[in-house]
């Protein structure tokens, strides 16, 4: 294996590139902007691991069990065991490259409690864990850049994969500056493009995660999995520009949820689930807030100011800057909002998709989290999946021989030119806004058949409009050509939610409120000549 | 209220001013304002003419990714955490950062930031801390957004020159303290690309959105 093309430079893409470089494989890392702009820098609360210094009574087995239970038992046991079993090594690695973890007086990293876990096992860097990890990984990538093993190319967006007879040989990438499509050949392609935020307009995350690549690859034959599982984070703060995440770290450090009734505070999570009620899994907390139908607050003001300044400075700053709330004096008004996508590209244990030599890592791959992700497990998964894919790639023979995708590239360039030379009466952003409205309405915390059917009809209409949009000159060329992929993915997500006639984890159907054994496995969807074919992964092909 | 924006269609076309009317709430950030102006199907300027959507860069919308750095009423700042109610004057004037080539409207090409760090080979390598524990300073230095605001205000920074600016000094500090064995070599490149060129105007610290103390980084690196 000689050359790997990695699309996306968040934590998973960086990890994969560094690990590949460690094997002497040349990695080209492509993204529209540098890693500092990726959603990974927004990760706040921490990363889970059971290590030698773990809390008394904790074990890797219990991390595995918590993860499987949190995911309502449809995450694969083998995959989850690999993830949790390697967590200590990952923390040690991050320490070894200089990540600035929060440490105790003995200089050793601290842990805090996170939702859905029996023990304190979340390592953290203040409330900017993702940012601190990105800073360390970028430096490490730069080290390999210096010796020519990593090349970081910015200003480029994914267009499509070069696929022939079920195998991938590279990708077409679009350069917004020159407005041309370039062919990049490689022995393997690793998708590390993050979540599907744009389907919902705005989420707690980055606007750079739009789901286009997953939608496009789906149209090119890639299987997608568990799309119906969308995590609503229970504690987000309304601001004039979006709902901003209030990290689970606040509840991890003792924060309490309440609403007011007859002038009295009701600590509804503690009343229903006991003293640790505030740290139930996110799907449960979000549903409880939803069904409370009252304004809910998160209170940490009983902790002294010095504690807040030391452990939650970023949360303090967000509340002050965006809402003028002093969290050391008053509670934070919170409500659930779309936060994380458990679904994505279906991959095997080595993170390869159904298309040979095409891998997917990080949030764009569906693995480990089942029907609901535990806080602190996705940073871990982003690094672990990047590593696993690199390990597998290192053992591969180079496949690039006499492949030629010139016709495909010429066609794509011609299509692009035709698009740029035309003008369309439909504004792309209008369609994107309509889509977001549809998704928020029909894929909320509580779903029904009737509503999902309506959602599918709406997206079908958007798709038909998208065919009529030639080019909307008021937005970038990427925003134009990505529309169809995004809409296709949305249609697939709604279809999967309709298919799963039960309630499990983050997928709650009021018309099927119970868990059903029949659906006790992953949902798979593929695009067959315009049809969206859905099935249950009963044989456990993708997760075992 | 008038919003005047210095715009530009493509990297090689001329810049031009275009104004818009805004009568909404002032309890909104400049990012929120740009989204508001861009929201309608037809974008109309203050002369009632149809125009194109305003190009600007954003990712996180909460001040942690550095994408939305621009010059707001002559002050370099992040659009997503600068609120209109805090701005002085009757007008809002937005322009792209001046120290970098413009790509489109308020978007600039900041690749030189990465290029400079790459050419000076700035990386920690292995965590080998020195005796002194400076956790808070290191934590803050590692929060650098690579937004370029410090370079925008710096009287000594020019894109493409050998003086690399405050963000470079802070990265050097991080490397020198996280890996004490590299301190000596890092000090050398720090001197070459920062120490010698810095006239200590320190305006970089006033604009840094994550409050990195470049002065502290300099003190540690100069002391040797
Ligand atoms: C506010 C917030 C807080 C969080 N806190 C935590 C936490 O405390 N602990 C935890 O474990 N997890 C947390 N998460 C989740 C976690 O941050 C993400 O799941 C993880 O960082 C994803 O990393 P990634 O590398 O897969 O993707 P990202 O970091 O999203 O990177 C995606 C990359 O792909 C690029 N890209 C996207 N589309 C294209 C395209 N078409 N062409 C080319 N490039 C493209 C992007 O520009 C970017 O470089 C949080 C998430 C959010 C939003
Ligand atoms: S030092 Fe501050 S101003 Fe300069 S790039 Fe970093 S975050 Fe931006
Ligand atoms: S959009 Fe990220 S800092 Fe403003």
Image (cartoon, coloured by chain):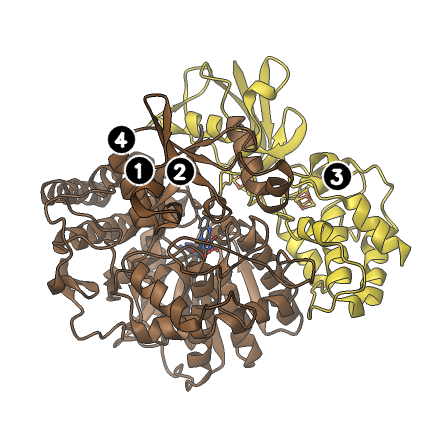
Give the left or right position of residue B194, taking residue A511 as reference.
Answer: right
Q: Which of pointers 4 and 2 lies earlier in the amino acid sequence? A: 2
Q: Give whichever of A540, A223 is nearer the camera.
A: A540
Give the left or right position of residue B9, taking residue A63 as reference.
Answer: right
Asked if labels 1 and 2 touch by Cβ distance under 8 angstroms, the answer is: yes
What tint does the image give chain B? yellow
Q: Which residue is mark 2?
A: A257
> Which chain, by letter, is brown?
A
The image quadrant of residue A233 is top left
B87 up-or-down from A165: above or below: above
Q: Which residue is mark 4?
A: A293
Determine which of the numbered discs, if any, sits on residue A289 in the image: 1
Does mark 1 fall on the same chain as mark 2? yes
Q: Mark 2 falls within which chain?
A: A
Give the left or right position of residue B32, taking residue A458 as reference.
Answer: right
Does mark 2 fall on the same chain as mark 3? no
Report the Cα–Cα distance between label 3 and label 2: 40 Å
**Crowd class of label 1 (few under 14; some 14 to 19; many from 20; radius 10 Å):** many
């Amino acid at each position: 294996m000689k050359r790997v093309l990695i699309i996306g430079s968040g934590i998973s893409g960086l990890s994969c590139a560094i690990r590949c470089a460690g094997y002497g494989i040349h990695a080209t890392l492509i993204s529209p902007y540098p890693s500092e702009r990726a959603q990974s820098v927004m990760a706040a609360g921490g990363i889970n691991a059971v290590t030698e210094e773990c809390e008394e009574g904790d074990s890797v087995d219990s991390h595995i069990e918590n993860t499987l239970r949190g995911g309502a038992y449809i995450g694969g046991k083998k995959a989850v065991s690999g993830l949790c079993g390697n967590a200590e090594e990952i923390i040690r690695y991050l320490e070894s490259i200089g990540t600035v973890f929060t440490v105790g007086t003995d200089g050793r990293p601290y842990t805090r409690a996170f939702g859905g876990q029996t023990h304190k096992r979340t390592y953290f860097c203040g409330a900017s864990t993702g940012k601190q990890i990105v800073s360390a990984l970028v430096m490490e990538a730069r080290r390999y850049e210096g010796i020519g093993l990593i090349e970081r190319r910015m200003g480029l967006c994914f267009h499509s994969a070069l696929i022939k007879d079920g195998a991938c040989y590279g990708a077409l990438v679009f350069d917004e500056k020159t407005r041309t499509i370039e062919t990049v050949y490689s022995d393997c392609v690793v998708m590390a493009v993050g979540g599907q935020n744009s389907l919902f307009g705005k989420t707690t995350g980055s606007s750079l995660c739009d789901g286009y690549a997953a939608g496009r690859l789906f149209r090119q034959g890639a299987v997608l999995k568990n799309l119906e599982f969308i995590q609503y984070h229970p504690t987000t703060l309304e601001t004039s520009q979006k709902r901003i995440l209030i990290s689970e770290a606040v509840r991890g450090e003792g924060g309490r949820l309440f609403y007011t009734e007859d002038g009295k505070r009701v600590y509804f999570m503690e009343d229903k689930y006991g003293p640790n009620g505030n740290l139930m899994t996110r799907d449960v907390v979000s549903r409880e807030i939803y069904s409370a139908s009252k304004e809910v607050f998160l209170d940490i003001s009983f902790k002294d100011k010095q504690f807040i300044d030391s452990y939650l400075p970023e949360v303090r700053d967000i509340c002050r800057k965006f809402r003028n709330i002093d969290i050391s004096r008053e509670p934070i008004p919170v409500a659930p909002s779309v936060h994380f996508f458990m679904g994505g590209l279906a991959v095997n244990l080595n993170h390869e998709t159904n298309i040979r030599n095409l891998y997917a890592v990080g949030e764009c791959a569906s693995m480990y989290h089942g029907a609901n992700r535990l806080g602190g497990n996705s940073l871990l998964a982003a690094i672990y999946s990047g590593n696993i894919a690199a390990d597998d790639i290192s053992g591969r023979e180079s496949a690039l021989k006499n492949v030629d995708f010139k016709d495909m590239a010429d066609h794509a360039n011609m299509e692009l030119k035709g698009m740029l030379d035309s003008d369309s009466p439909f504004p792309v952003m209008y369609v994107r806004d309509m889509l977001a409205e549809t998704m928020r309405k029909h894929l909320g915390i509580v779903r029904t058949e009737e509503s999902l059917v309506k959602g599918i009809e709406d997206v079908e209409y958007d798709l038909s409009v998208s065919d009529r949009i030639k080019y909307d000159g008021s937005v970038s060329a990427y925003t134009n050509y990505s529309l169809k992929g995004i809409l296709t993915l949305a249609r697939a997500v709604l279809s999967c939610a309709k298919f799963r006639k039960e309630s499990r984890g983050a997928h709650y159907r009021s018309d099927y409120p119970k868990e059903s054994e029949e659906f006790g496995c992953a949902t798979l969807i593929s695009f067959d000549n315009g049809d969206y074919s859905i099935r249950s992964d009963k044989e456990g092909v993708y997760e075992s | 209220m008038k919003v005047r924006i210095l715009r530009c269609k493509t990297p090689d076309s001329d810049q031009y001013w275009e104004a818009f009317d805004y009568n909404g709430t002032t309890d909104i950030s400049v990012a929120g304002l740009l989204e508001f102006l861009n929201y309608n199907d037809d974008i109309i300027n203050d002369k009632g003419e149809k125009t194109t959507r305003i190009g600007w860069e954003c990712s996180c919308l909460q001040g942690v990714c550095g994408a939305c750095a621009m010059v707001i009423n002559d002050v370099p700042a992040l659009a997503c955490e600068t609120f209109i109610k805090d701005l002085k004057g009757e007008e809002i004037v937005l322009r792209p950062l001046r120290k970098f080539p413009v790509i489109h409207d308020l978007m600039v090409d900041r690749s030189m930031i990465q290029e400079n760090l790459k050419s000076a080979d700035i990386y920690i390598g292995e965590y080998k801390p020195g005796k002194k524990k400076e956790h808070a300073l290191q934590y803050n230095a590692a929060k650098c957004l690579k937004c370029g605001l410090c370079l925008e205000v710096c009287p000594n920074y020019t894109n493409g020159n050998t003086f690399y600016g405050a963000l470079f000094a802070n990265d050097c500090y991080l490397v020198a303290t996280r890996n004490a064995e590299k301190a000596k070599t890092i000090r050398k490149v720090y001197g070459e690309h920062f120490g010698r060129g810095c006239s200590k105007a320190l305006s970089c610290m006033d604009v840094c959105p994550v409050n990195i103390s470049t002065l502290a980084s300099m003190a540690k690196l100069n002391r040797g």
